[in-house]
Amino acid sequence: MAVDDIAAQLARERALKQAEKMETIGRLTGAIAQQFNELLGAILARSAALSKSLPSNRDLEELQATVQRGSELVQRLLGFSRHHVLDLQPLILSEFVRDTLDTLRRQLPAKIDVQFEADQEGAVVEADPAAVKQILQHLVTNARDAMPQGGTLHVEVRRARLGTADRPLHAWVEPGSYVSVALSDTGTGMDAPTLARVFEPFFTTKPVGVGTGLGMSMAYGLVKQHRGYLHLYSEPGQGTTAKVYLPAVRDRGMPEHLEEAADEGLPGGTEAVLLVEDDPTMRLAAQQLLAKVGYRVIQAGDGQQGLEAFRAHRAELQLVITDVVMPKLSGFDMYAAIRGESRTVRVLFMSGFPAPNFRKTIGQDPAVAFVTKPWTASEMLAQVRVLLEARP
């Protein structure tokens, strides 16, 4: 077995262990929450009966208020464990997210710039409007708390296609058509150990007394209950992107025997491509995907290595795919050096962070494009073909 195949298998095993851990935590949390909810219901009913038979009593009122807060906490735990009752109905997700964002924008400080983009034709999902609003509220609140000094919150709603080729980055997805909602902030970001635990109930990096540590876990549970997926990409000091995928109504998954046929439809080519990415998992996933559809891939682990590889293979390279934030030399700095030597080579930037500033600067270069991490196979390969087939 090749080294790349072993690394890919290890990545899938890690993803499976994480998914199994979350399933176990969810079952345990749900069982405890249901039992606790019954106890709270009995206390609330008894206190209500006492309040009718006794004179006004402040202690009794405080007890009822406390029980009510406990009941709200239980509902959040049930949301994480996927025991929340959903009221499913057709939603044009882009319109719903736009309207919800207008409401949530009023709760954000003026120093946070909120931006919104969506496909022109809105795709329909079958979802519970109240649950989707909760998911968005938790993700927006998390982004706000990550930007205490202000920043940018960029929200995008796009059609998306997930297939077996996406499993190295989006483990255990069901192939089919989805609608994705990506929320990118320019906040403090998270390191790998924090990212691995971010969906666990009561896990929080906030100070004591700030938040409950249930926002992200509840968002995770509600998305899973919709048969969707929630993926995060983050780097310390750079920000976080949360991507929610909900199944599109017209394609609620794909039969297993059609999975390989769908992956065969991914666009490919035979051109030479330079892939520059410092994250080994992301680099391996991209390399395997590009090689699978026919591209000749040259790899580099940081911007300096990428620039050296470009100079060594300049005559054969037609495209550079690069991360933005890297050690030694950033993707933007590497791009500037490459542009000083070649005006024709195409460049595709990968980043988990908002693209507006990119579009205002180097985005004016017609031989440049941008794909958001965590990207899907169809997103990545479509951008690659658009760049390679564009006129010089």
Image (spheres, rainbow, N blue to C red):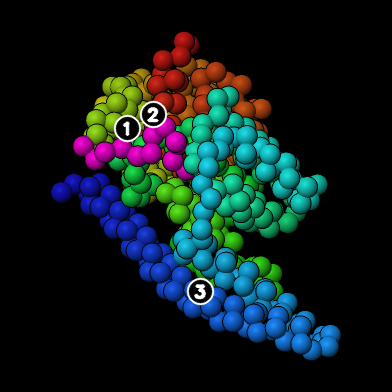
Mark 2 highlights which residue? 381
Say which of 345 and 260 sits in front: 260
Q: Quadrant of residue 157?
A: top right
Proximity of marks 1 and 2: CB atoms separated by less than 8 Å: yes
In percent of the image, x 26 and y 38: which residue is there? 255
Say which of 260 and 359 sits in front: 260
Q: Earlier in the sequence, mark 3 or mark 2?
A: 3
Say which of 3 and 34 sits in front: 34
Q: Quadrant of residue 275?
A: top left
What kind of element bears circle 3? helix
Task: Residue 137: tell me if it is visible.
Answer: yes
389 is higher (above) or lower (below) than 37: above
Residue 33's label in the rendered image is 3
**What distance separates the C-alpha of mark 1 from that of mark 3?**
46 Å
384 is higher (above) or lower (below) than 282: above
Task: Residue 286: tell me if it is visible.
Answer: no
